[in-house]
Amino acid sequence: MPVALSRPGDLCLPQASVRAPEAPPPVCWAAVPEVTVDENSHAAAWEHQVRGTAVGKLTVEAEPCAGSVEGTSQEQLRFGVLAAASTKALTRRGRHPLLHHETQSSTDSAALPFRPEAVLGFRRQTQRERGRLPEVRVRDTYNLGAAIDSGGHGCTAAALDGIARSVPLSRKPAAIDLFCGAGGASLGLLVAGFDLRLGIDVDPTYGVTHNANLTSRFMAADLRQLDVDKIGRAAEVEPGELDLLFAGPPCQGFSMMGSRVVWDERNNLFREVLRVASGLRPRAVVIENVPGLLTLAGGEYLRAILQGLAEVGYVASCAELLAAQYGAPQMRWRLVVVAWRDDQGIPPGYGFPAPTHGHRSIGDLVSNRTVTTNDMRGFVTAYEAISDLPAVCAGCMVERYTGRPVTPYQERMREGLGDELWNHYAARLSKANLARIAALKPGQDWRDLPFELLPPGMQRALRKDHTRRYRRMTWDGTPRAVITRFRDPKTGEYTHPEQDRTITIREAARLQGFPDCFVFHGDRSSQYEQVGNAVPVQLASAVADELLRCLNGQPGPQLREPFRRRPVPALGVHGELLDTLVPV
């Protein structure tokens, strides 16, 4: 199990955050029509059923045999029978949660115990042993389906609520991170328990940071120039084998803080995600971006993404998630799309984690609207996140801790380290900016500055505009979203609560959830970009953890009315695009 280590270059994971995957009972997502199989015709009978399905009713008819009957291709079924001239069935009774075991035999089957196992694919072998087949949990290249007889660890075709569940994984789930940047989402996937096979980003400098901190392979490339087969070979996965494709396409074209130009070429990179998803056929796809995607071009970009996922065989839904509600010390909103391959049988709205901090649910809080102090109760504060880091002057860097951690969050961030400290650099500021921030108390902004200290452009600004510019952070508040320009006090709430400087690269990394052992490389400008562009680690980990629960048959609550405070007409009650649902 990966742990936090004391030097750059080692895999950097806070030990307390790593959880061993649970091993729930084996279950399956959906049933299919009855199929009859015998030892001579099993290949033909299963060829049309194996891709993307699980077993609803299995009937095995065979003469006595010394061992199991074995197919030779991915579309064939391996099974064994023990009773002479017997017929047995596993039947799903409507919405009843258990598979029913029926027996019809011309011999005394009690003398020969019978426990059939139906397995789609050949990831693991079933073997007959003295009249008893072992129970197995099997992964198939195309669907991970399995049927297990009710005589043992009962297979559940549907839960009591009538919603089907997934077959648990028998090995560590594989993931690829597209547009991975320095590795915020990548680290979150690793913390949750995924086997991150590959990260791809166009900037090779990001790869230096990625390779110094994470064990997964990094590929520096323009995704538009990459063949899907090459991606699969680099990640060592065949089509259908990948469990999760995670993607965070560049968001500047969608962001409310950007120019929001419809024709910005970065806005079309989501089509590359769809191309890769269509070729690799992962079980799940996650696309994260800024909430501005909801409204750009009247919502047509979001519609195109959800519609595109449906066209390549995925059931998708979306919601706005607030990173602070998952333990990240910042008010950062992300629009998250979760899509399940349609053969998984997972309805829209699953895969969105319930908040772990505060007391509001998904959809209760809305971006670009007031979030009250009461709403923020339970969020990690600036004091909890960064108050232990040593003082530093603007334009300087400190490389050693001078005090001990004083909060649980700080202890997790410093786990495994001695007194060494990396990236604790504060940007150099002009004399004018130093004078401005020196005049501000915690919680104050440009409107509290003397008129003569204001930049000429802001002397003409309306008092209701730019309310976060030059704002000094407060110790008891949860910081605003970190952006790439957090070195400049004019861009937002990035001035330290006490010291006359903007927050350091390390402090911003703390707000993004990176532990202190995660070292950023490249020049200073690149380091600011790497931190500002990252997905908050805690948010990525929470989403990945919930995806694992779904893949293991233990999903949390289904998303319901995520846009109730700010309705999006094209989206349904579970965040799905209304006109793309495939009838069940």
Image: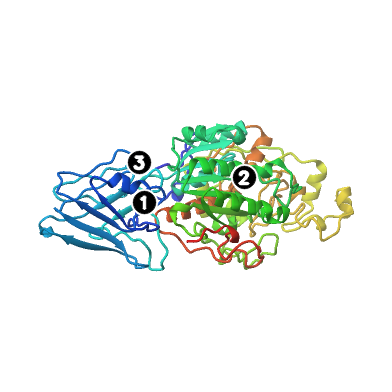
The residue depicted at 53 percent of the width and 34 percent of the height is 218
Above or below residue 550? Residue 205 is above
> Seen in the image, is 370 located left or right of residue 324?
right
At label 1, the amino acid type is Gly
Q: Position of residue 426 (x, y in %)?
A: 68, 41
At label 3, the amino acid type is Gln
Q: Quadrant of residue 72?
A: top left
Residue at which label 3 appears: 74
Q: Which residue is at the front of the view, 199 or 539?
A: 199
The CA distance from mark 1 to mark 3 is: 13 Å
Mark 3 or mark 2, which has the lower sequence index? 3
Dots 3 and 2: beta carbons under 8 Å?
Answer: no
Q: How many marks?
A: 3
Mark 1 or mark 2, which has the lower sequence index? 1
The CA distance from mark 1 to mark 2 is: 30 Å
The CA distance from mark 3 to mark 2 is: 32 Å
Residue 101 in sight? yes
Q: Position of residue 556 (x, y in %)?
A: 46, 61
Mark 1 or mark 3, which has the lower sequence index? 3
Q: In terms of secondary structure, where does tag 3 sit?
A: loop
Q: Position of residue 325 (x, y in %)?
A: 57, 59
Residue 270, disc:
2
Residue 145, disc:
1
Of labels 1 and 2, the one closer to you: 1
